[in-house]
Image (cartoon, grey):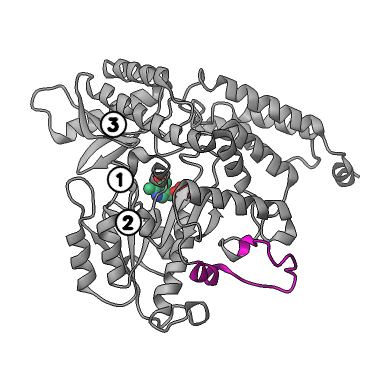
Amino acid sequence: MAAGRAILRPMDHLALDRAAWHARRYLDQVDTRSVAAPATRDALLARFDIPLLPEGLPAAQVIDDLAAAAEGGQLGTGSARFFAWVIGGALPSAIAAEWLVSAWAQNAVIYATSPVPSVVEEVAGKWLLDLLRLPATASFAFTTGCQMAHFTGLAAARDQVLRAVGWDVATQGLAGSPPIRVLASELRHVSLDRALRYLGIGSHQLEILPVDGDGLLAPLVLEAALARGSGPTIVGLNAGDLNTAAFDPYPALIPLAHAHGAWVHVDGAFGLFARSSERFATLTDGMDLADSWATDCHKWLNVPQDCGFAAVRHPEPHRRAMTIHDSYFVGEQAARDAIDWTPEWSRRARAFGVYAALRELGRDGVTGLIERNSAQCEALVRGLAELPGVELISPPRLNQGLVRFLDPRPGATAAEHDARTERVIETINRGGEAMFGGVTWQGRRAMRVCVVNWQTDETAVARTIAAVARSLSL
Ligand SMILES: Cc1ncc(COP(=O)(O)O)c(C=O)c1O
């Protein structure tokens, strides 16, 4: 019988070898491939949307077909010349560790379902707290990304601020609870809003605070906002705004929030990693006074996608917000069960990539990566700003900067400068040599420059500036 034959097929090692071969080939070509994805949606659909066969195929053939069909549909996010959004590359040890995780097929929900992910999470989490100079006693969770790290930190916050007014959200829910106020800057990443929505805290409960000319939340603004209301309050601060890498002034803001009984949550999706370098101490000092922090390992630590990290100063509300028990949970008293700290149930053993990346880079390697990317961002943004018709909108800070492209016609309007900026970004991206994203910043269209890749070097910066120069004349 066809179905029986498929199930009884032995493990096809050839499929693993073919996958390794395709992966190596792809990685070897990253520097010469188009950074853009040349394949159209129609072409990809035509290759993938084929009839599902009644009978299965040999695994190796499936992998060969998959690699062939995917060709040209990948963005060069692993390329040294990928500067769009904030998407890190992937270190070799982290990629390879992820392969092992897939081969082992472990479920990292509790220690009993697999001991080794539990132990590796325990150690990788401890290392990250140390590297990011967060309290060693903080609890932590490895999540799918920074948005779910927000969810985790804010769930702990919700538990704590409601408990402080005599409301147990775990048993009483939110119906009839005292309302929670959330104060956050207008530059917050909207993944914070989405995490709040999941927690039953709607947009009307979010008070958006204006920032100053540098994109920072001023202490006077926060103080006035705190004084305007009362009751359970959460304050969301930025550690590296997406466009200008603005870092809020923590030593002034956090004690203010605490004086009003508020919980402070920091979005450090990429910016938290700046704490690994003394060079950025003026930006990041005082951030450790907060109550919870969210970051991504799939951004600046360069592990493959699907790895965020939440740290919480107060383990009790964190555990209360996440933990659950069933009679089938058995195991080792001393062991860490991820289900006590993360929103998921069955889950990938995602800390292996982090553990591997930290071992491959070492402490100095992480610091070096942050400092190198920052210097490359400076060189790239300054180099672009020297090209004719390019205007610097936001100077390079940490690893972000903004430029725009001016319409050369005399008396060009704001809309024409915006249109020119859009056109040039499109031309650069279509060229396949480098990739950037666009954003509307203070009413003007701009090109975002973000450097978060371990492979970026001076040659990549020079090639990119040359590619942008060519695009200007097209
Ligand atoms: C500042 C900031 N916060 C949060 C997020 C959301 O992170 P993730 O996509 O890992 O959920 C991002 C994503 O780019 C970000 O840049």
Measure the alpha-carbon separation of dots 2 and 3.
30 Å
In the rendered view, does 178 fall on the left or right side of 56? left
Q: Nearer the viewer, mark 2 or mark 3?
A: 2
| Residue 70 appears in view | yes
Q: Nearer the viewer, residue 474 or 161?
A: 161
Ligand 1 under 8 Å from disc 3 Cβ = no
Measure the alpha-carbon separation of dots 3 and 1.
32 Å
Residue type at the position of mark 3? Glu
In the rendered view, does 121 fall on the left or right side of 294? right
- Which residue is painted at 60% across and 48% down in the image? 351
Residue 385 x, y percent position in the rendering = 23, 24
Residue type at the position of mark 2? Leu
Reading the image, the residue beneath label 3 is 422
Disc ID at residue 474: none
**Looking at the picture, does residue 105 appear above or below residue 410?**
below
User: Which range is magenta?
Assistant: 315-339
The reply to whether the magenta stretch includes residue 94 is no
Reading the image, the residue beneath label 1 is 283
The reply to whether the magenta stretch includes residue 323 is yes
Residue type at the position of mark 1? Leu
Ligand 1 under 8 Å from disc 2 Cβ = no
Residue 184 x, y percent position in the rendering = 29, 60
- Which residue is painted at 66% across and 55% down in the image? 118
Reading the image, the residue beneath label 2 is 237
Circle 3/circle 1 CB separation < 8 Å: no
Q: Quadrant of residue 6?
A: top right
Secondary structure mostly taken by the magenta-highlighted segment of the chain: loop
Quarter of the figure that contains the N terminus:
top right
